[in-house]
Image: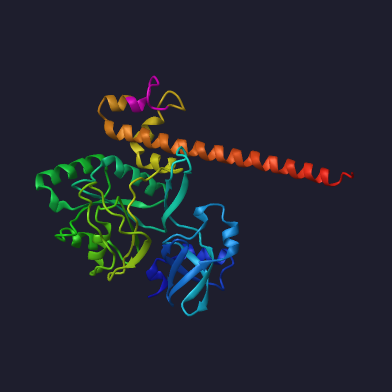
């Protein structure tokens, strides 16, 4: 297997040379478990760790390797390697997690995967079906430059009439988004999914616990490699059977990434992704009377008018407002954090100055 088969291309090679890593090997991160990594290249697979210097220089979790990243390594022998740094990411999927409003909990950014070509957003038709949740994932994917697609799974659990109704809703609300209908248990739609996956491209499976991500990947692999669990009969929720992010390689040359189920996908600084996905609203907003229009109650708001006239789906409009508000709240939180850091830096500088003066006094 060549590096190109793992997704390596000229973008990464150009950056490797520009960063002065021409003498170092490159490898792709295939597994991430609590700070430990497995990386793979044309020579094999290694258990890898990052250097203390990288830990010290990291400004946030985004500076650490994630599954899908290309990294510069030194081969230590015996399938061991040291990661010296990350190559710039071509695309990224990240989310905010945690709640800064809860006592003892803070909001942070988590990189779900890097250098992804397509994000498969999976929902099951029986219990997980929610159009607003689709839009939340789509905004996050498009903000990171990733093309989204829909997998509607467990289609054997509802009637053909109900399935057709759901499919009509999806196509009406999400123009231009590919939809694949599947059932892991009956294997319906598996051939369609296989045909969709191309050699050398990377696909990330996203969705809540219990929607069947791991089961579908097992079917694609042709063996039960990934542990799967049943839906709880008392809570109607899936168990978190996937506990780590891991990359798998299909016979046809496609690359897939399984992720732990996410009950909540917080919006980070993804205003651009929201504007991109809700393009019809963004275009109308340009003709609003006020440049800072909130599209809620201002006079001559073109967005509100379009909703009233039925040109924009009301549910889609309300979800747009909700996602924008959440992203803006995150942005404000980050500004507050930066201001606190600035004030603390100013305080520290003053304290050092006072300490220096005190140190020169004689008693």
Image point (28%, 63%), residue name: 227
299 part of magenta stretch: yes
**182 within the magenta span:** no
Residue depicted at x 57% and y 64%: 18
Query: Residue sitting at 56 percent across and 40 percent down?
Result: 337
Residue 82's spot in the image, x, y percent?
53, 70
In the picture, which quadrant includes the C terminus?
A: top right
Query: Can I make out residue 312 in this image?
Result: no
Main secondary structure along the magenta-highlighted residues: loop
Extreme residue in the front direction: 363
**Quadrant assignment, res 136:** top left
The residue sitting at 45% across, 66% down in the picture is 37
- Camera-nearest residue between 16 and 126: 126
Left or right of 184 on screen, residue 347: right
Picture quarter with the N terminus: bottom left
Question: What are the residue bounds of the magenta stretch?
Answer: 294-304
Q: Camera-side residue: 15 or 340?
A: 340
In this rendering, is residue 73 above or below 332? below
Is 103 placed left or right of 194 in the picture? right
Residue 155 on image: x %, y %: 16, 52
Q: Which colour scheme is used?
A: rainbow
Q: Residue furthest bottom?
A: 78
């Amino acid at each position: 297997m060549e590096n190109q088969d793992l997704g390596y291309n000229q973008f990464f090679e150009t950056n490797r040379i520009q960063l002065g890593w021409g003498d170092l090997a490159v490898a792709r991160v295939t597994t991430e478990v609590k700070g430990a990594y497995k990386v793979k290249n044309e020579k094999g697979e290694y258990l890898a760790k990052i250097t203390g210097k990288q830990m010290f220089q990291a400004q946030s979790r985004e500076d650490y390797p994630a599954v899908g990243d290309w990294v510069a390594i030194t081969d230590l022998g015996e399938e061991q390697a040291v990661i010296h740094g990350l190559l710039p990411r071509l695309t990224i999927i990240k989310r905010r997690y945690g709640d800064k409003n809860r006592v003892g909990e803070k909001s942070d950014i988590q990189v779900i995967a890097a250098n992804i070509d397509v994000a498969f957003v999976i929902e099951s038709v029986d219990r997980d079906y929610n159009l607003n949740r689709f839009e939340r994932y789509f905004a996050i994917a498009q903000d990171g430059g990733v093309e989204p697609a829909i997998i509607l799974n467990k289609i054997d659990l509802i009637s053909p009439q109900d399935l057709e109704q759901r499919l009509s809703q999806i196509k009406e609300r999400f123009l231009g988004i590919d939809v694949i209908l599947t059932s892991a248990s009956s294997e319906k739609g598996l051939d369609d999914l296989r045909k969709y996956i191309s050699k050398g491209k990377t696909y990330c499976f996203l969705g809540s616990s219990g929607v069947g991500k791991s089961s579908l990947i097992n079917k694609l692999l042709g063996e039960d490699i990934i542990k799967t669990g049943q839906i709880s009969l008392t809570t109607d929720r899936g168990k978190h059977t996937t506990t780590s992010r891991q990359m798998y390689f299909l016979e046809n040359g496609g690359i897939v990434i399984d992720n732990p189920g996410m009950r909540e996908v917080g919006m980070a600084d993804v205003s651009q992704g929201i504007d991109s996905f809700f393009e019809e609203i963004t275009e109308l907003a340009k003709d609003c009377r006020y440049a800072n229009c909130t599209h809620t109650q201002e006079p001559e708001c073109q967005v509100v008018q379009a909703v009233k006239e039925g040109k924009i789906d009301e549910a889609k409009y309300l979800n747009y407002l909700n996602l924008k508000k959440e992203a803006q709240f995150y942005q404000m939180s980050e500004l507050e954090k930066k201001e606190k850091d600035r004030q603390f830096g100013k305080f520290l500088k003053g304290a050092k100055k006072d300490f220096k003066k005190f140190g020169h006094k004689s008693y």
